[in-house]
Amino acid sequence: MTELTTFSDCKKDDLIVITGAGGFIAGALARYFHDRGFTCIRAVDKKPLPDWYQIVPGVESLCLDVSDEANCKRVCEGAVEVYNLAADMGGMGFIERFRVQCLRSILINTHMIEAAYRAGAQRYFFSSSACAYNTQLQEDPNCRALKESDAYPAMSERGYGWEKLLSEMFCQEYWAERGMKTFIARFHNVYGPHGTWDGGREKAPAAICRKVIEAKDKNTGTIDIWGDGTQTRSFMYIDDCTEGIDRIMHCDKLIATPINLGSSELVAINALVSLAEEIGGVKLNRTHDLNAPRGVAGRNSDNTMIKDILDWEPTMPFRTGLAKTYAWIAQQYEDRKAGRRTVRDTI
Ligand code: NAD
């Protein structure tokens, strides 16, 4: 069997801590390092274990709330690398409605970074977001792609975006003042199998796939779309995200330097619906809910910096990634109908 690539020079039994691992991206990250032969991974999430999206065999899985300082100390004990992906988050429907909850994630990074520093961790990763960018640059669906310097002057997404921006600053100052190597990736919409697909926290690709599958199943012939559908985004497939995290965390040129981790393939929501219809082999009548949350008008990732520094960028074409995601959600939908366990039921 050929060994899978990693960019880490850690020993295989160095302790890697991953928070938020009961969720989508951190769960995939635990699997990523496990598959590359790392034997000492500590996965942490506040959700009870039966509710985790993925449980990776051989990985230590702890149910702890990392907004609590004492828990963070426990979690970081002996850590060589810390990946902090825990956050209270969801798609636009969630982050526009629950700003306080989003802001309170500041406690997670505040305590995790201090605990990692005190534990002598060599590297610390923080999952930031494109929502940290100045919203005034995102008022047009044909927006220019956002480059890293566009976060300032700051006018982040209310709640969620400001929390990310301030947590980024913590990371930058822990390097500047205390010499801990920190790494910050600004994710642009991540999608793929094992993500949230129902229940209120799901993002557009999963929500649209589910709606198409549901319309087919119930033979309704219609689909409801949030906003007028002209809003644009770029979407990054989960495998590109985990590889990107590994690459960024292990590149010393990127210490304390926020960098975009996203696809630069801009997609309008209406085009996303057409693709999902094509994959599902169905054509639906569209209704547009103009009062639903829709977020900024347009957002794309400028990948000049990641290409310059890492000579790499996410590569999965959206059509291919969406087909894989659609197939996984269709299976989840069937499982739920048949009374079998699904990701949705565990939220
Ligand atoms: P997710 O909701 O699937 O996973 C986050 C996990 O964090 C959840 O399982 C949740 O239970 C856990 N968590 C929340 N508060 C916690 C606490 N106090 N203690 C322990 N665990 C806690 O979300 P995701 O999509 O996997 O996102 C992971 C990270 O990436 C987050 O920081 C998110 O802000 C960031 N991000 C995600 C996207 C995206 O498109 N999914 C985009 C930009 C940034």
Image (cartoon, rainbow, N blue to C red):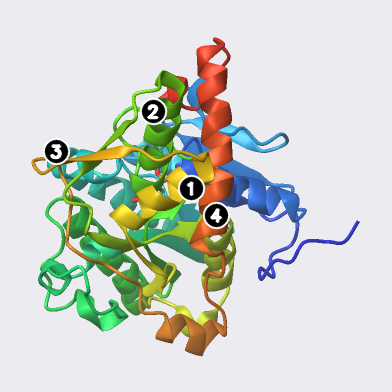
The amino acid type, in three-letter code, at marker 3 is: Arg
Mark pair 1, 3: CA separation? 32 Å
First in sequence, mark 1 or 2: give its number.
Answer: 2
Tags 1 and 3 touching, CB below 8 Å: no
Mark pair 1, 2: CA separation? 14 Å
Q: Is mark 4 on a helix, strand or loop?
A: helix
Question: In the image, is 145 to the left or to the right of 313?
Answer: left
Label 1 vs label 3, nearer the camera: 1
Tags 4 and 2 touching, CB below 8 Å: no
Per the rendering, the mark at residue 215 is 2
Per the rendering, the mark at residue 278 is 1
Q: Which residue is drawn at 39% across and 58% down?
A: 127
Q: Which residue is drawn at 35% across and 73% down?
A: 301
Per the rendering, the mark at residue 194 is none
On the image, which quarter does residue 320 sit in? bottom right
Name above or below for residue 96 compared with residue 329. Answer: below
